[in-house]
Every structure is written in structure tokens, then in C-alpha cells.
Image (spheres, helix red, strand yellow):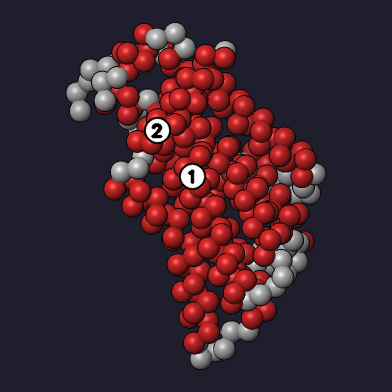
Amino acid sequence: MKNILQNAIATCLYEIRSSFTIQRTSVSLVLALFPPTMLGLLILGARFSRAGVSNSILQGFTPLLTITLTGLVCLLSLILWATPNVSAELEGKSWVFIASRPGGRISIFLGKYLAAISVSFTICIIAISLCTFLINSQLPTGDAVKFWISLSGLFFLACLAYGGIFSLLGVLFIKRAMTFSVGFVIGADLIMGSVPGVLMNKFSIRYHLQEISLVWLGWFLPSNSETGYRAIFGEGYSVTAHILIIFGVTLVTLCIGAWAIVNREYITAYEA
């Protein structure tokens, strides 16, 4: 077990070092700068609009926009990094060497998972920091530190859970892992997570993250009342319960992924 963890950390460090290419760095910078750029354009447009949008309206809308945009780049970065965990090795013709080493499969699975959540969380931190600075400089509320800490914790949990799910999909669906990951987000989080009912929507990761954010940040959703929201999502659990569920989902997906990557046989030579 100790050797597996050491090899996983070594794989993670290697993946991070190898990511410092022009292409990957450019993609990461674009993802990190997208939320603050869109937020800045919104604030700038509101300042110069003829309608004269008030600061109170902007202050109520900017948290939702920050979470939405940062969540989008978080998911995109995880899909780009976590899903090719097996396909990249097969295409690089290094899978035979990895599979022949003791614990090699689990090490590569866990190592690439750690690399994916590390890079994605770094992208989220940069986006959150720039958005927080922008909001505090244009719409000062005095809660910048709390806002930054809350969002950082929220997206750390998001990276853990979605990283585990996308890594599992990368093991199960080699060639179409990205497609299945996008389908999972649309089906499980956007559609199933919005279905009215007490049970159905609670199976989505979005629900648990959403409930945590409402406690840590306060009410920031467009509706002025929680009545309609609770009619769809029901009463929430405690923050501790939501966090434990997220950790549980992460652990379960990683265990299933580790079992699958050890027991599956992959074709190392196939037609493109």
C-alpha cells in the first residue's frame, strides 16, 4: 500500500511537470481567466448602461455568476485532465509497461486523479481570487475573505467528487470518456438535479454542493424566497452530512475505478 501511494504521488508530480507545455498552459490560463473576464464585462456593462443598475442588484447577482462560471471551468478542466487516464497510456503505448509492474495500474489511476484535481483546483483558485478582487474593488461588501474561503472550500469538494466520477468514467469508457462525462453532468446534475421531489435530486453532486454554498454564503439564488426552492429540492441536511456524502461518493468512485482498472483487459493495439 505504501509503495502504491508513493508511486501515485510520483505519477501525479510527473503529470503536473509534463503539463507545462505551451498548449496545456494556454488552455489552463484561458479557463482560469474566463470567469473574471466575464464578471468584469458584466460589471462594466452595468456601470455604463442607460438603465443604471444599482450596486445592490449587482452585489446580489455577482456571487451566483462567480459560482456558475467557476463551476463551468472546474468541470471542463476535470474532464480534460481526468478522463484520459487510460486512453492516454494506450495511445502512448506505455500501458503494457504499466500493467506489468506491481500495483502499476492503481498507481497510474490514483496519480492521474491527484494530478487532475490539483490542476483543476489551482485553476479554480486563480478564478476565485480574481473574481473576489474584482467584486471587492468595484462592489465592496466587507466579506471578501469569507467569500474567498467559502468558494475555495466549495470547489475543493467539487474537484474531489467530480474528479473521482470522471476518473471512473475514463476507466470504463476509454474512447468516449469525455462524451460520457458531459452526458453525466447534463443528465445527473442539470436534469435529474432539477426534478421536483425529495429523493431524486438528492442523488446529484450539485444538490449537496448547492446546499453547502447556501449555508456558507447565504442566500444568493435569483428567487427572493426559499419556498419555491424548497418545493423542488426539499429540506437540506446539515453541512457535515453533505460533506460526508461528497467524501463518500469520492471514495466509492475511486474504489470502483481502482477495481475496474485492475480487473479489466484493455486492447493495446486497435484501429483508430
Image: 78 above or below 55: above
Closer to the camera: disc 2 or disc 1?
A: 2
Considering the numbered disc 2 on the image, is that residue within a helix, a strand or a loop? helix
The quarter holding residue 160 reads top right
Is residue 16 in view? Answer: yes
Say left or right for 107 vs 66.
left
The quarter holding residue 53 reads bottom right
Cα–Cα gap, marks 2 and 1: 13 Å
Numbered badge on residue 199: none
Considering the numbered disc 1 on the image, is that residue within a helix, a strand or a loop? helix
Instruction: State which quarter of the image contains the N terminus.
Output: top right
Looking at the image, which residue is at 44% across and 31% down?
13
Numbered badge on residue 120: 1
Looking at the image, which residue is at 33% across and 27% down?
87
Q: How many marks?
A: 2
Say left or right for 66 vs 150.
left
- Crowding near the residue tagged with mark 1, few <14, some 14–19, many ≥20 C-alpha atoms within 10 Å: many
Instruction: State which quarter of the image contains the C terminus.
Output: top left
- For this rendering, which residue is in front, 45 or 107? 107
Residue at the farthest left position: 271
Is residue 191 in view? Answer: no
What percent of the width, then of the height, locates residue 186? 49, 46
What percent of the width, then of the height, locates residue 201? 65, 44
Residue at the farthest bottom position: 50
What percent of the width, then of the height, locates residue 143? 71, 66
Numbered badge on residue 15: 2
Mark 2 belongs to which amino acid?
Answer: Glu
What percent of the width, then of the height, locates residue 43? 53, 77
Say left or right for 63 vs 3.
right
Image: 59 above or below 84: below
